[in-house]
C-alpha cells in the first residue's frame, strides 16, 4: 500500500500528494520503497525512476515544493558511503537514463546519460577502438552519474588524470526544476562556469546529474603488468618512488600491504610490443632484489576485493604523499597492534589509498579510527558496520567549508538533495 503521510520538518503530519508525482513519471515508475532501498540505515518511502531529464527536473521541483528529502541513486554501488541522510523520503533512480547519446569518435568525445553503466559505455566505445580512461569500482553496475558524484576514477588516474580532468560538459537538474548545462562537446570548449568540476565529487548534494560529455583515449594495443614482492613496505615504497622518478610510461602503480608486514608492488604498462619489452627490462632493473611474481592483470582487482564480505568491516579512503606510504603503513601497524584488528591497504602511486579494518569489537574499531584520523590529514570512512553509524565519516570540515555552504545554499536552498550525507552535514 502506498504511504500517504509523513512527518514534516516541523513535526506536523502532512499529506504527500504522491499521485501528482505518478502523473509526472507514469504509474509503473513510482513504487513503495523496500528494505533494500534504505540509505545508510534510513528507510525512504518511495522510489521514482524518471525517464528523461525533464522528468527528473519536474520530480525535483515537486519534491522541493512538498518539503521532501531526495536521495539520487545510480547503480547503488556506493549508497552506503557518507553519513546517514537527515531525511530520505524519496529515492530518485537514474536507471532509465541509460543511453549513449552521441559518440563523436573522430573528435574523441562522447555524450552519455547518467544512468549508463561504466561497462556499457566502455563496450560501446571499444567498438571504435576507444575508451573512457577510468577503471572505477564495480563497473558492471556503477553508473556515470554515480562515479561522477563520488569521484571514483580508479587506477588509471595516475596516467590520464581524474574524472575532473576527463569531463568536458555536464547537464544537471536542480531542486527548483531548473535544467543547467555547462561545457560543450569539444575538448577545447571552456565556456561558462565550470559546473563539471564542481559537481564531480559533490555527492549529489547540489543537483542530479542527467548527462555528461567526456574526452576519450584510444584503446591500448597491448597491456603488461608486473608484481614484485618485498619483505617490508619500505622497500616497496622505494621502488614506487624510483619508478615515478624514471622515464617509464606506466599507466598504473600501486602498493599492497597488510598487518603481516610484507608488501607487493604492482605496475602496469600499455602500448606496442617493442615499447613494452623495453619498459619491462627497465622496471626489472629498478626492482633489484624484489621477487617478481610474473605478468598478472588480476592484481588490479585488489581494491575491489577489499569490499568482499565487508558488511561488518571498516573501509576508509586516505591521501598521503607518495614518500610517506611506508610511514603511513607503519602508523597502521602501531595503531592496530594493541588490539585484535587486522588491516590491509591498497595505495596508488599518487598516495591515494584505501584500507580495510577487520574486527568484531566496535569499540576498538572506533578508537582506532579516531587515532588514524588524528594522524592522517585526509582520512574518510567509506563503509562501516551499523554499530558505528554515529561515527562522522568525513572528519573536520576545513577552511573551505563556508564556501561549500554558500554553494549548497545557492544550488539547493531548501536542502532537498542528500541533506546531511556530505561533509559538515551539507
Image: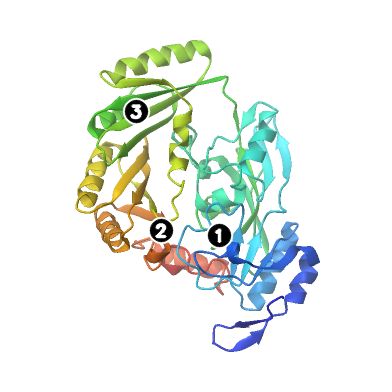
Q: Which mark is residue 204?
A: 1
Q: How is the image coloured?
A: rainbow
Could you tell me which residue is drawn at 28 percent across and 21 percent down?
290
- Report, in whole angstroms, how far the alpha carbon at label 2 lies from the one at label 1: 20 Å
For the residue labelled by badge 1, is the local secondary structure a helix, a strand or a loop?
loop
For label 2, count other residues whose C-alpha is less than 10 Å away and answer few (under 14), some (14-19) or many (20+). many
Q: Earlier in the sequence, mark 2 or mark 1?
A: 1
As drawn, 403 above or below 339? below
Could you tell me which residue is drawn at 20 percent across and 48 percent down?
334
For label 3, count other residues whose C-alpha is less than 10 Å away and answer few (under 14), some (14-19) or many (20+). some
Q: Label 3 belongs to which residue? A: 244
Q: In this view, does 204 lie to the left or right of 107?
A: left
- Report, in whole angstroms, how far the alpha carbon at label 1 lies from the one at label 3: 34 Å
For the residue labelled by badge 3, is the local secondary structure a helix, a strand or a loop?
helix
As drawn, 175 above or below 195? below
Q: Label 2 belongs to which residue? A: 384
Could you tell me which residue is drawn at 27 percent across and 60 percent down?
364
Q: Which of marks 1 and 3 is nearer the N terminus?
A: 1
Amino acid at each position: 500500500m502506498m504511504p500517504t503521510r509523513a512527518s514534516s520538518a516541523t513535526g506536523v503530519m502532512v499529506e504527500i500528494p504522491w499521485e501528482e508525482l505518478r502523473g509526472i513519471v507514469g504509474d509503473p515508475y513510482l513504487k513503495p520503497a523496500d528494505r533494500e532501498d534504505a540509505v545508510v540505515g534510513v528507510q525512504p518511502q518511495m522510489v521514482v525512476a524518471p525517464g528523461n531529464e525533464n522528468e527528473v527536473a519536474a520530480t525535483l521541483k515537486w519534491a522541493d515544493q512538498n518539503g521532501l528529502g531526495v536521495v539520487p541513486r545510480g547503480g547503488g554501488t556506493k549508497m552506503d558511503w557518507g553519513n546517514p541522510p537527515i531525511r530520505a523520503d524519496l529515492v530518485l533512480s537514474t536507471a532509465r537514463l541509460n543511453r549513449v547519446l552521441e559518440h563523436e569518435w573522430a573528435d574523441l568525445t562522447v555524450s552519455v546519460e547518467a544512468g549508463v553503466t561504466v561497462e556499457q559505455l566502455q563496450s560501446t566505445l571499444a567498438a571504435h577502438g576507444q575508451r573512457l580512461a577510468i577503471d572505477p569500482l564495480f563497473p558492471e553496475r556503477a553508473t556515470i552519474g554515480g562515479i561522477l558524484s563520488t569521484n571514483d576514477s580508479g587506477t588509471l588516474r595516475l596516467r590520464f588524470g581524474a574524472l575532473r580532468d576527463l569531463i568536458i560538459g555536464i547537464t544537471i537538474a536542480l531542486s527548483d526544476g531548473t535544467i543547467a548545462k555547462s561545457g560543450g562537446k569539444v575538448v577545447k570548449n571552456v565556456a561558462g562556469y565550470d559546473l563539471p568540476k564542481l559537481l564531480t565529487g559533490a555527492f549529489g548534494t547540489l543537483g542530479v546529474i542527467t548527462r555528461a560529455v567526456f574526452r576519450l583515449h584510444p584503446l591500448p594495443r597491448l597491456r603488461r603488468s608486473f608484481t614484485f614482492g618485498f619483505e617490508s613496505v619500505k622497500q616497496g615504497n622505494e621502488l614506487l618512488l624510483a619508478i615515478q622518478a624514471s622515464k617509464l610510461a606506466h599507466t598504473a602503480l600501486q602498493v599492497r600491504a597488510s598487518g603481516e608486514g610484507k608488501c607487493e608492488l604492482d605496475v602496469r604498462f600499455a602500448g606496442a610490443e617493442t615499447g613494452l619489452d623495453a619498459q619491462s627490462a627497465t622496471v626489472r632493473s629498478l626492482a633489484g632484489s624484489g621477487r617478481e611474481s610474473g605478468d598478472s592483470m588480476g592484481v588490479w582487482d585488489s581494491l575491489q576485493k577489499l569490499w568482499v564480505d565487508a558488511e561488518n568491516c571498516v573501509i576508509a579512503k586516505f591521501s598521503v604523499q607518495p614518500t610517506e606510504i611506508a610511514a603511513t603503513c607503519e602508523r597502521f601497524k602501531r595503531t592496530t597492534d594493541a588490539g585484535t584488528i587486522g588491516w590491509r591497504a591498497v595505495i596508488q602511486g599518487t598516495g591515494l589509498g584505501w584500507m580495510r579494518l577487520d574486527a568484531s569489537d566496535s569499540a576498538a574499531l572506533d578508537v582506532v579510527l579516531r587515532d588514524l584520523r588524528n594522524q592522517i590529514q585526509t582520512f574518510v570512512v567509506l563503509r562501516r558496520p551499523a554499530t558505528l553509524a554515529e561515527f562522522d565519516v568525513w572528519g573536520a570540515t576545513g577552511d573551505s567549508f563556508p564556501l561549500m555552504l554558500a554553494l549548497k545554499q545557492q544550488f539547493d536552498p531548501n536542502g532537498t538533495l542528500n541533506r546531511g550525507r556530505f561533509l559538515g552535514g551539507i
